[in-house]
Image (cartoon, helix red, strand yellow):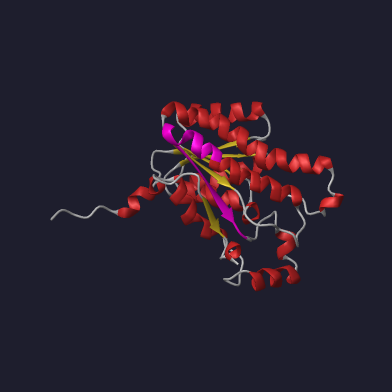
Amino acid sequence: MGALADPTRSFRLDGRTAIVTGASSGIGVALAETLARAGADVVLAARRREALETLAGRLAGEGARALAVSCDVARDADLEALVAATLERFGRIDVLVNNAGINEVVPAEEESEETWRRVLDVNLTGAFLCARRVGREMLASGSGSIVNVASVLGVVASAQIKQASYVASKSGLVGLTRELAGQWARRGVRVNALAPGWFETEMTADMFQDERSQRWIRSRDPMGRPGQVEELAGPLLFLASDASSYVTGQVVAVDGGWTIV
């Protein structure tokens, strides 16, 4: 009887190239590290070049190949340069992780149009522009996996933490994920989303420094705690790799059960 096939091999990304936007801090750093440690060549994209170079150097020290590219995802010219740099260095694009995002906490009745547009420009329009540009390369090659980093606040309301523009942008990203998946499924490109719950990052630092906010999370989350960024590694690898080859248009909530109650 022959040896059984190793089921973990489908999670590997050896020989593939992944772009991660918003890779200069927080969840983006963890996601980029995960892909690199699974064997991918990783292109790190964000506006803060120095932070990207630091991460690229750390990954190189672990034996990975990483490229830092300064990029504003809401600018077409920057996205063209990002794709060109990726193809020049690695010759292919197999995975895109749309992670760049910002938020503003302000009551809806006081939120300015400028703030509203800025949040949607980065979180939703930027994700679409990036998926559109990278998607063209993937469609031409007949394969690829796009993972949009949405949020549980794209599935349920925030309400107590007032951020209408952020909730709208992430809800839109969930819808965009399904639409792109439907349009591109027969052309070899899969599009899915991660919906993280409450994780301590640069964006949520103020909240995690407040004991009242921490008690609120612990009391409402079925697991009674926030997430740790390393807990996103498994779900990301599943969606980015061949392990999810028959999965598209799905939103995977990594939230300790936040969205089930």
Residue appearing at x 31%, y 54% in the figure: 7
User: Residue 150, position in %: x, y?
Assistant: 60, 49
User: Residue 33, position in %: x, y?
Assistant: 51, 50
Residue appearing at x 57%, y 58% in the figure: 229
- Of 23 and 174, the residue lying toward us: 174
Apparent side of residue 200 relative to residue 40 in the rendered image (left or right): right
Magenta stretch holds residue 154: no
Residues rendered magenta in the picture: 179-197
Residue 169 in view in this figure: yes
Which quadrant does the C terminus fall into? bottom right
Q: How many marks?
A: 0
User: Residue 19, position in %: x, y?
Assistant: 53, 39
Residue appearing at x 67%, y 43% in the figure: 123
- Of 208 and 25, the residue lying toward us: 208
Which quadrant does the N terminus fall into? bottom left
As displayed, is residue 53 above or below residue 198? above
- Of 55 and 156, the residue lying toward us: 156
Q: Quadrant of residue 196?
A: bottom right
Residue appearing at x 58%, y 71% in the figure: 222
User: Residue 236, position in %: x, y?
Assistant: 49, 51
As displayed, is residue 79 above or below residue 149? above
Magenta stretch holds residue 192: yes
- Of 143 and 36, the residue lying toward us: 143
